Amino acid sequence: MTSVWFDTALLSDGWAHSVRVSHDDGVVTAIETGVAIGPDEERGAIGVPGLGNLHSHAFQRGMAGLAERRGRESDDFWSWRRVMYQFVDRLNPEDVEAIAALAYAEMLESGFTRVGEFHYLHHDRDGAPYADPAELAARIAAAAAATGMGLTLLPVFYAHSGFGGAEPRPEQRRFVNTTDAYAALVEASRGAVKDLADGVVGVAPHSLRAATPEELALITPLAAGGPVHIHIAEQAREVDDCVAWSGRRPVEWLLDHAEVDACWCLVHATHLTEAEIDRLARGSAVVGLCPITEANLGDGLFPAARFVGAGGRFGVGSDSNVLIDAAEELRLLEYGQRLSRRARNVLASGQRPSVGGTLFCAALAGGAQALGVGKGGIRVGAAADLVSLDAGCAAFLGRDGDALLDGWLFAARGGAVDGVWRRGRKVVAEGRHVRKVELVQAFARTLDRVLRA
């Protein structure tokens, strides 16, 4: 049994001082407060639990910044997607692993300790299946193992290019499966994560435009009580196309036709009516918000003020990984609401007036639920996923309690995270992943080849 001692730490029941978190085999076994640091004990200054990153496409880290060039006409998600298709056509399994490994190291450096990998790249470059249907899923698992990142693997079902079962496009050939092939992929993916200490496998119908109602009904039971994630209502055009197909908006249709429960995560859900917001908030599903990517793609703003005010559950994800920063996701979530409502401190609650405290704790709980690991937080029986903030950072000076979270989310620059323990093993020290040099070198070799191809 080993331990980490913090000057102050956010525990499941609130902030405490002089905290010892003991762990064994990756799991918290005891928490003591008001105790002196022991000899040779690992030390952190400001301890907080690691956050869940509930939505990632790891391979897209390799194309970060490549779509920031204006086309002849106005650009949107759909023009960005064309660039993504061109990039993904060049990747082999080794490339996928190298890119994912660097992305996961950067996530850990920012305070994420588990990722929901919405993994839709399944086949070889010509669209032919690999001999092992989980060849690329295994590469994702290998990247998680190499970095220490907790993994909730979400193999994606993708069969169509549009609502109503439209034929897939040639550039989608690496994503497409039948329901039978997908069932085999899910089973093989469970094998791919079996050597990870706490790997989780769920299912992910890509979207209502990529899966017919009949296919949705066939694949969701494959989750077997695990997570079910789906893109939904991300773009206005998607909403219009769904209405043309079904007479219903996407979230409205899903809530009417699927048993959406606490296992579900509705990713983006950007374009909602007030009735959809209230209905979704009354349920137990989590909404997965990705403010950096949603801003980068020009998708729009999720109506978070009404949703949170109605008791809705949410978490955050890095999605396209154009910029990986846990604090920035939460900061941008609040700032988007401030800009749209022309008000300040929008998402704080009356019970918890700190915006940072409210956002962090809500995202912690929502992320843990959506990633299939129960409750988040530093608690006995939970994974020893611990983050240390640098007490020397100006944003933390003279502050205590939730004011530390306000400082981190709204006043700290990059590098506020100085240490991360994932299942009790230190994977980030002095702000850098312990394998960062070799991971960057592998990433550089990959990008040099891929971008010159």
Image: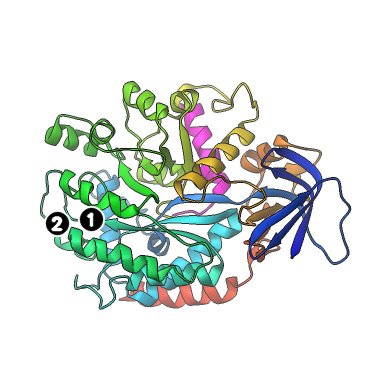
Residue 158 is labelled as: 1
Judge whether residue 80 can be spotted in this image: no
Residue drawn 23% across and 45% down? 73
Kindly identify the amino acid type of the residue bearing the numbered disc 1.
Answer: Tyr
Please state, as top left, top right, bottom left or bottom right, where the C terminus lies in the image. bottom left
Q: Are marks 2 and 1 in contact (CB under 8 Å)?
A: yes
Residue named by callout 2: 168
Image-quadrant location for residue 116: bottom left
Rendered view: 266 above or below 95: above
User: Residue at horizontal 10%, vertical 54%?
Assistant: 167
- Is residue 83 visible in the rendered image? The answer is yes
If the image is split into quadrants, where does the N terminus sit? Answer: bottom right
Q: State which mark lies toward you, 2 or 1.
A: 1
Question: Few, some or many C-alpha atoms within 10 Å of disc 1 (few <14, some 14-19, many ≥20)?
Answer: many
* Residue 115 image offset from top left, x and y in percent: 48, 56
> Judging from the image, what secondary structure is the residue with disc 2 in?
loop
- Which residues, given as a range, are shown in magenta? 322-339
Dot 2 crowding, Cα within 10 Å, few <14, some 14–19, many 20+: some
